[in-house]
C-alpha cells in the first residue's frame, strides 16, 4: 500500500533539489494515508479522543529528488505494543531506486495527555494495528 507523492516546485531549494525537511512532511502524509487504508481515518481516531504525538523522526537520504518527480512511499509497522507505534518508511523514485529511508515513533494518548490502554480501551484499533504489525 504505497502512498504516491509528486514533488512540488515549492518543495525544492535554490539548487532545484527537494529540501530535506519535506521528506518528514511526506512521512506524515503517508502515515495518515496508511491509517486510512487500514480503516482508521485520522479524523475518526481524533474523534474517539485519541491524540498521537510524534516522539521521534529520522531520515536517511540516499538520492535527491527534484520538481515533478513521483515518490512512492511504503509504510510498515516496525513495532506496536499498544502505547507506542514505530513506523518505517521507504521512499522510491519512478525507477525503483531508494531516495530516502525514514522512521517515526508515535504515542497514543488521551486528550489530557495521558497514555491510553489501547488493548482495553480501544480493542478494535488495537487489533487493526496489531494485525498490520504482524504482516
Image (cartoon, rainbow, N blue to C red):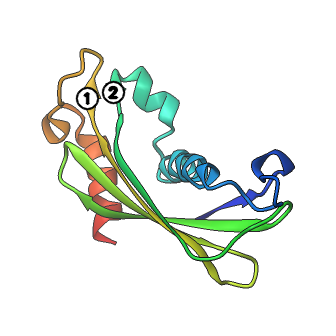
Give the class, few, some or many, for how many residues have Cα within 10 Å of label 2's Cα (few <14, many ≥20).
many
Q: Quadrant of residue 4?
A: bottom right
Q: Quadrant of residue 40?
A: top left
Which element is circle 1 on?
A: strand
Point out residue 17 in the picture as x, y percentages from the top left corner.
Answer: 76, 62
Residue at screen point 35% across, 34% down:
52
Tag 2 residue: 50
Extreme residue toward the top, this view: 112
Q: Quadrant of residue 110?
A: top left
Point out residue 31 in the picture as x, y percentages from the top left corner.
Answer: 50, 50
Residue at screen point 13% across, 36% down:
120
The reply, left or right, for residue 121 in relation to residue 75 is left
Location of the N terminus by quadrant is bottom right
Is residue 42 placed above or below 131 in the rendered structure? above
Residue at screen point 16% across, 42% down:
119
Is residue 61 placed above or below 20 in the rendered structure? below
Point out residue 61 in the picture as x, y percentages from the top left corner.
Answer: 55, 69
Residue at screen point 17% across, 30% down:
115
Tag 1 residue: 109
Point out residue 81 in the picture as x, y percentages from the top left corner.
Answer: 17, 53
Circle nearer the N terminus (1, 2): 2
Give the class, few, some or many, for how many residues have Cα within 10 Å of label 1's Cα (few <14, many ≥20).
some
The reply, left or right, for residue 9 in relation to residue 45 is right
Q: Is residue 115 visible?
A: yes
Is residue 91 placed above or below 32 in the rendered structure? below
Give the alpha-carbon distance from disc 1 to disc 2, as whole Å.
6 Å
The reply, left or right, for residue 106 in relation to residue 39 is left
Amino acid at each position: 500500500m504505497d502512498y504516491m507523492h509528486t514533488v512540488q516546485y515549492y518543495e525544492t531549494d535554490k539548487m532545484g533539489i527537494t529540501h530535506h525537511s519535506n521528506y518528514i512532511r511526506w512521512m506524515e502524509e503517508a502515515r495518515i494515508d496508511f491509517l486510512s487504508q487500514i480503516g482508521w481515518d485520522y479524523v475518526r481516531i481524533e474523534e474517539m479522543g485519541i491524540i498521537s504525538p510524534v516522539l521521534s523522526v529520522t531520515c536517511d537520504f540516499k538520492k535527491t529528488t527534484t520538481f515533478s518527480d513521483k515518490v512512492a512511499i511504503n509504510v510498515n509497522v516496525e513495532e506496536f505494543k499498544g502505547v507506542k507505534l514505530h513506523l518505517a518508511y521507504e521512499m522510491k523514485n519512478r525507477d525503483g531506486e531508494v531516495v530516502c529511508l525514514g522512521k517515526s515513533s508515535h504515542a497514543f494518548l488521551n486528550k489530557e495527555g495521558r497514555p491510553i490502554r489501547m488493548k482495553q480501551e480501544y480493542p478494535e484499533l488495537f487489533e487493526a494495528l496489531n494485525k498490520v504489525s504482524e504482516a
